[in-house]
Image (tube, rainbow, N blue to C red):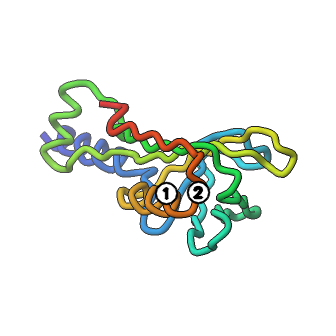
Amino acid sequence: MKKTVALMVLLTISVAAGAVEGGQVAYAGGTLSGVKPGTIGRLDTAQETSLVFEHPSGKIIIPFSRIESFTYSEERARRLGVLPTIAIGLFKRLQRRHFFRISYRDDANLPQAIVLEGPKQTPQTLEAILKARVPDRCKSMQHPRSGN
């Protein structure tokens, strides 16, 4: 019995690990060189002309005028079998990961893409800011749930 309880606690802790918290965002992937997937940073949306991803080794500046499209999606944090899902569900709600993909052109006019993971409120806030500041020619696509 003690081993079963210990296993359930261990599974619950492992599911919670790796989640992005508070005002943080994580670089999940993209075309940027020098930034490793999983790098945690902060997204500065206060600038009127550009979006800035500040991370420990520097910043990525994306001018709003160069953004071509943006997409929001969410996925389950972990894909488990039926029994582990039920066991974890008894103690904790299944978490979802929230991603925002931005396609833009860099200073050399080359296509670039960045995928950021953030807490639940980040996509709605970021989408509102991008809709207000990105030129009308930009395509906004929303995928409500891509990982059910």
Is 45 situated left or right of 124 in this image? right
Q: Which image quadrant is residue 90 in?
A: top left
Residue type of the residue flagged with mark 2: Val
Query: Which residue lies at the image location 39% right of the left edge and 57% below the top edge?
Result: 124
Q: Where is residue 98 in the image (x, y as percent from the top left)?
A: 41, 47
Numbered badge on residue 95: none
- 59 versus 147 height, above or below: below
Q: Position of residue 3 (x, y in %)?
A: 21, 39
- 66 versus 59 height, above or below: above
Query: Which residue lies at the image location 37% right of the left edge and 32% below the top edge?
Result: 146
Marks 2 and 1, Cα distance to the nearest angstrom? Answer: 6 Å
Q: Quadrant of the C terminus?
A: top left
Could you say which is closer to the camera, residue 145 or residue 21? 145
Q: Position of residue 43 (x, y in %)?
A: 57, 65
Q: Farthest residue toward the right?
A: 108
Q: Does the residue at mark 2 contact the one at mark 1 (Cβ under 8 Å)? A: yes
Q: Which image quadrant is residue 135 in?
A: bottom right
Q: Decide: few, some or many residues near mark 2? Use Cα within 10 Å; few <14, some 14-19, many ≥20.
A: many
Q: What element carries label 1?
A: helix
Query: Which residue lies at the image location 43% right of the left edge and 68% below the top edge?
Result: 22
- 114 versus 48 height, above or below: above
Is 90 situated left or right of 71 in this image? left
- Provide the residue designation for mark 1: 131
Residue type of the residue flagged with mark 1: Lys
